[in-house]
Amino acid sequence: MAGADGDDSLYPIAVLIDELRNEDVQLRLNSIKKLSTIALALGVERTRTELLPFLTDTIYDEDEVLLALAEQLGNFTMLVGGSEYVHCLLPPLESLATVEETVVRDKAVESLRKISQEHSPVDLEVHFEPLVKRLASGDWFTSRTSACGLFSVCYPRVSSTVKAEIRQHFRTLCSDDTPMVRRAAASKLGEFAKVLELDYVKSDIISLFTALASDEQDSVRLLAVEACVSIATLLPQEDLETLVMPTLRQAAEDKSWRVRYMVADKFSELQKAVGPEITKNDLVPAFQNLLKDCEAEVRAAAANKVKEFCENLPEDSREQIIMTHILPCVKELVSDTNQHVKSALASVIMGLSTILGKDNTIEHLLPLFLAQLKDECPEVRLNIISNLDCVNEVIGIRQLSQSLLPAIVELAEDAKWRVRLAIIEYMPLLAGQLGVEFFDEKLNTLCMAWLIDHVYAIREAATCNLMKLVEKFGAEWAQNTIVPKVLGMANDPNYLHRMTTLFCINALSEACGQDITTKQMLPVVLKMSTDQVANVRFNVAKSLQKIGPVIDSSALQTEVKPVLEKLATDTDMDVKYFAQEAISVLVLA
């Protein structure tokens, strides 16, 4: 060890070298994560002259160690002496940007982008730009893909000669032989277009965009669709029709479903980028085709955008376009053969009611909602129910209540517990919209049935649900409707149901207030302290701790204290523990 020679200044780097050569990956990883501490100990000069060269030479390791190193180096500017020395960080990051593992390369590029901002314009041209060129003309595709992410950060701050070189390199990479490189270039095309001067966008970017959008690989073509959004926002309206639209039309009818899916997925952004006129003439028919696509994934992606697309239509012709062009397609999708398509539509279709208004909703949309409430797929029914508030604002929920009820009951008893859980979560919302009489008559029994479900998550959610209902309908309603039923479960032969009584009391005590808690709930809890099952007894102790602050102080001393003291001497360890904890929290000792 260097420390043995008495030279303490070498000690940190010696330890690092030892740890980085250790066979244990975790040790190597930990030492990389402590790099900033080591750099601080060495000081800026030795970090530049010793630490960075050492790191540059030892980049042969497990991917997770390299990933940590790439991340650390992005925050190293101050540790090498600030922005005038930041170029010292480029060699190790350049090596990391060429490794085989994509995640490491991406992190190295992210760190390079970060430190490019710290370079002065002169340093950028002297140090950073040559690095980008080296990567762009590297033999391995890995370095060329990394270069694609660096053009846009150095382009705005270099001289016009260097700008021309950068544009040339980007053009070359867009027609690279390796699909991975073309994919990387296509994914950065929009970002690069944003930093270019408008004339070059028209002369260079459009031709690259057209070429990438008709690439033989669909993975490249679909990334060109993403770039289309950025390019369309940069161009003046009059140029869009000639420069962008032919390519976009071609993408919307591409032979690969993945490209059409991308168009559907980005449809709202494209619509905002191209403006109202092109939307009316071009995008409406394209959207209709996507809604009728032969691939279910494309139809589902388009169905997801129905509400957004309709909202963004020009106001003067919105209703007419929806009624004549969009609604007929939507009607077909309601009875689609694929459940994901129907489910995607169900999650947004309710939003159309606010756009179309009361009369159109009742005449055209209501029959569709009713059909979806009877769909055999639980997700479809659930998505309709979860978006009821949109319709409630426009036509009131009464119109739906007759069909709503069977749908809710079916979902409440669905074999999949996650479906049951989801419907419970919408109960308070439904209760608020349907009103207390309808709720008591039709839905109360359901809410109570969930309390004895065989899945704990359902029982827990049902308890929460009761609390929200009491907050909505008030303590008096709880006293008459909920509390008697909950307390009745205290005598249930199944100990799990007896425990649910305690969980409900915990949840309801605050909402119900002191009077109901002390007079009705407390006696039941105290009675359960003699239960045969230890789990019930220790939950009694926990419940008394929870409801203690709500109970009036005389009952706390005369009734609660003796019971907790008795439980504190129980034979079961857990019962003892929770009873003693309750005594100390409630200050009854």
Image (cartoon, rainbow, N blue to C red):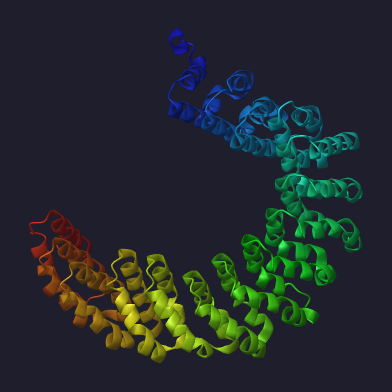
Task: Count the numbered circles shown.
Answer: 0
Figure check: 568 above or below 448: above
Locate residue 267: give its quadrant: bottom right
Q: Is residue 223 visible in the rendered structure shown here? A: yes
Q: Which residue is drawn at 63% across and 18% down?
A: 49
Where's the C terminus, which quadrant? bottom left
Figure check: 418 above or below 330: above
Locate residue 165: give its quadrant: top right
Towards the viewer: 173 or 428: 173
Q: Which residue is drawn at 70% across and 47% down?
A: 219
What percent of the width, then of the height, locates residue 473?
A: 38, 85
Q: Residue at x 34, y 77 (%)?
A: 466
Towards the viewer: 212 or 289: 289
Towards the viewer: 483 or 564: 483
Q: Is residue 233 visible in the rendered structure shown here? A: no
Q: Left or right of 184: which side holds 481?
A: left
What percent of the width, then of the height, locates residue 124?
A: 78, 33
Q: Left or right of 361: which side holds 538?
A: left
Locate residue 72: give its quadrant: top right
What percent of the width, then of the height, locates residue 64?
A: 52, 33
Q: Left or right of 589: which side holds 145?
A: right
Where's the N terminus, which quadrant? top left
